[in-house]
Image (spheres, grey):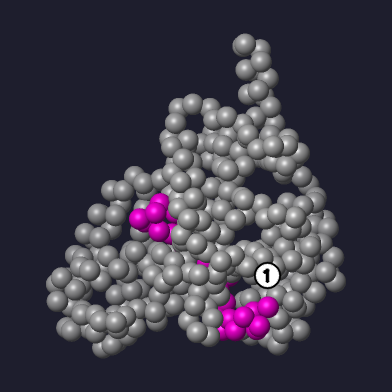
Amino acid sequence: MRIGIDVKEKDIDFILSILSSHHEISIDEILLQMLKKNISSSDILFILLEILTQNGYVTGSKGILKVVRPMDKRESDKIKRNLIKSLSRSKKVFVTPLEVGKFFQCPRRVWLEKVVVSTQKKEEKGKVWDGEALHFAINQFVKNLEKEEISAAVQTAVESALEKYAGKTELSKEKLTEFLNKFYEFVKEEEINVVFTEKMLESFSEGLIGTPDIIGIKKDGKIVPIDIKLGHLGKRLKKEHLLQIVGESILTEKFFRKQVEVAYLIYFESNSLVKIILRQEMKRAFLRYKINLVKTLKSNCIPTISRLPNFKRRVCPGCHVKHVCENIEMLKRCMS
């Protein structure tokens, strides 16, 4: 959760430098360069382009921008100051797709984590650390692909993850190696040419911020968000997982200004792959939960505990603020 829009001066400078160094450039190319530089919101670009177009500096048609006349430093500094001042007034609440998924599971859990900021208790060894080690290995693997052969990239990523989380993770070298090799096969089969890992995205309009595990760009230009889960895929897809990947798809759409048609969930322990065909009703359902989450975070009331069937077995064991919640329930019983 975050309140307000955080615009960095260097991000605006970077966009202006791209425009000043080209007579003609595609918006897609600017967006790729922005993502590589970890500029999280394309809203900055499009607000800036609107200002520059109104002032006669650029024109655009069919995704191609043309720089009509150069901008001097005094004018660019003025535009930058006004843009930062305007956006900094926002008091909008930003939440993540993961928080929306957690809200579906248990409203009180998110409230305790993000509003009360309760102390979170993590186990010293086990699943939580396994998940972190898995995601670290994937992150390292994607980065190593640019510099090493596949086998070397896999080996380096696995060794780095197991060394970083030594004594905490129970993942085996063999299973982690097998997973990364299969992930690479999947990337090739789907004709994904460009892979970004753990890039933060945010949408000013939707009040969303998040970091998809993988953003893939296919040979045909289609954008594919991919989320990696440590656990098993059960008989039915968990709704909290679906909500999270739908939210990340919305973020990806908003950044690239292209419709995202398909997303994937990959489950490590069951070696399973789920292809999600995204529909508008899924996105509307996600946004309804997101609106209710923001209302809950702004409320002065302690939210209810989970109402899911068997929540004590399904939700509570993995909750890091369970001890605080139990104290609240005990106090309520004492007062009744």
User: Furthest-left residue in view?
Assistant: 55
Question: Would you say residue 158 sits in the magenta stretch?
Answer: no
Q: Is residue 25 left or right of residue 226?
A: left
Q: Is residue 225 left or right of residue 66?
A: right
Range drawn in magenta: 186-209
Q: Is residue 141 visible?
A: yes
Q: Nearer the viewer, residue 331 or 237?
A: 237
Residue 57 appears at what percent x and percent y? 18, 78
Question: Would you say residue 196 sits in the magenta stretch?
Answer: yes
Relative to 293, residue 50 above or below: below
Relative to 277, residue 88 above or below: above
Residue 115 appears at what percent x and percent y? 51, 36
Location of the C terminus by quadrant is top right
Residue 7 appears at what percent x and percent y? 35, 59
- The residue that appears at 53% across and 85% down in the rendered structure is 219
- The residue that appears at 69% across and 37% down in the rendered structure is 309
Circle 1 is placed at which residue position?
138
Q: Is residue 13 left or right of residue 333?
A: left
Q: Is residue 153 left or right of residue 278?
A: right
- The residue that appears at 29% across and 75% down in the rendered structure is 16
- The residue that appears at 69% across and 60% down in the rendered structure is 229
Kind of residue at badge 1: Ile
Residue 177 appears at what percent x and percent y? 79, 74
Q: Nearer the viewer, residue 131 or 333?
A: 333
Instruction: Estimate how packed mark 1 is, as few (under 14), some (14 to 19) or many (20 or more) residues with alpha carbons within 10 Å.
Output: many
